[in-house]
Amino acid sequence: MNIKEFIHKMPKAELHLHIEGSFEPELMFKIASRNGIKLPYKDIETLKQAYNFNNLQEFLDVYYAGAGVLITEQDFYDLTWAYLEKIHQQNVIHTEIFFDPQTHTERGVAFDTVIDGIHKALVDGQDKLGISSVLIMSFLRHLDEASAFKTLQSGLRHKDKIKAVGLDSSEVGNPPSKFKKVFDAARQEGFLTVAHAGEEGPASYVYEALDLLKVSRIDHGNRSLDDDKLVEKLIDLQMPLTVCPLSNLKLKVVNDMKVHPLKKMLQLGLKATVNSDDPAYFGGYMNENFEAVTQALDLSKKDLIRLSKNAFEAGFVDEATKQKLLQQLEVFQEQTVI
Ligand code: HPA
Ligand code: ZN
């Protein structure tokens, strides 16, 4: 089996995916049109030309503009369903999805509209496609603590649908410490915690995410490698890192896939995983991410299995579900001569 087929067939889990970042241009124009909203791009081609980013902020500006056409529960359902259908074709059997409530509530869309649409699609994803999923409510770190607290309050009405809280948006200048109290409150309510850290921000933000926000995973974490002590700590803790190769390339976190730190992370014994982050904007879903790093870093099939196994092990699911997922990977491994 060639490596491309191997990547395609390997059962995978995705742990770092912003549902608003899976908004493909075609669907965006369709939903804009049915809501009578005019996008600031005249057509799909012009929109795609805007997908040339020099940093995280340039991407976020386009991403929030796109998300601005989502109004109804059906819109959020359609967005989520399109993503699930896509990953189903790629043999992703489990996914943990971020949603950014404030991106929508700030525009006057009700919290319940957002979560109900997403959740209904996730239920259908389980029933019709066999994809298990977890929802992570992410706070926008460029907004203030009070806004995050208000969002947490809304989330409490939907505790049954939300497993964890996260932290995303503009990293530099918005350290994890800004949200310590909100994360304390979230943990007291029983939520697990994760945070984007060390994407553009320094290694000290990764320390803060661990020590102050008590995260169970670090989203991205690339800049951890600047600090040997931190690397040691992450290895000791076997702290999962949800790495996003194509995102890193598109946002110029790395200049070339050939110098992406993923292989080094694996060699060091860090618990790295591969994820798509915002696939509609960064040029690919899970398989394209795996293909890009495999080609650039010459990853072996053994490396690929390790990455997939890391993701299943790092999932926020109960032990029985985890074992079932891992078993699918084992069956694949047994059927495939490595
Ligand atoms: N980083 C921070 N915020 C985000 C990202 C990201 O990669 N994607 C969507 N929101
Ligand atoms: Zn992200």
Image (cartoon, grey):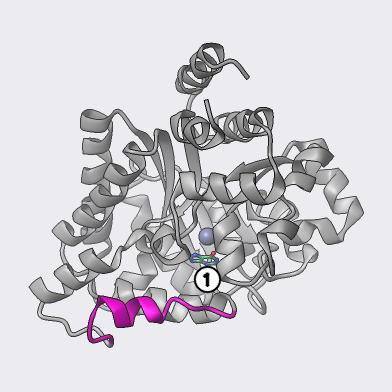
From the top left corner, tell me how far across and down residue 163 is, in percent: 44, 42
For the point 24% across and 69% down, the residue is 28
Q: Is residue 158 left or right of residue 316?
A: left
Amino acid marked by disc 1: Ser
**Cβ at disc 1 under 8 Å from ligand 1:** yes
For the point 43% across and 58% down, the residue is 279
Q: Is residue 16 left or right of residue 304?
A: left
From the top left corner, tell me how far across and down residue 90 is, in percent: 39, 38
Residue 221 colored in magenta in the image: no
User: Going by the picture, which residue comes out furthest to the right?
Assistant: 229
Identify residue for label 1: 169
Residue nearest the viewer, comparing 313 with 51: 51
Q: How many marks?
A: 1
Q: Is residue 332 left or right of residue 41?
A: right
Quadrant containing the C terminus is top right
Residue 42 colored in magenta in the image: yes
Q: For numbered disc 1, what is the local secondary structure?
A: loop
From the top left corner, tell me how far across and down residue 141 is, in percent: 54, 71
From the top left corner, tell me how far across and down residue 193 is, in percent: 57, 49
The part of the chain drawn in magenta is 41-54
Q: Is residue 140 left or right of residue 177?
A: left
Residue 103, quarter of picture: bottom left
- Is 285 placed above or below 268 here? below
Q: Is residue 304 visible?
A: yes
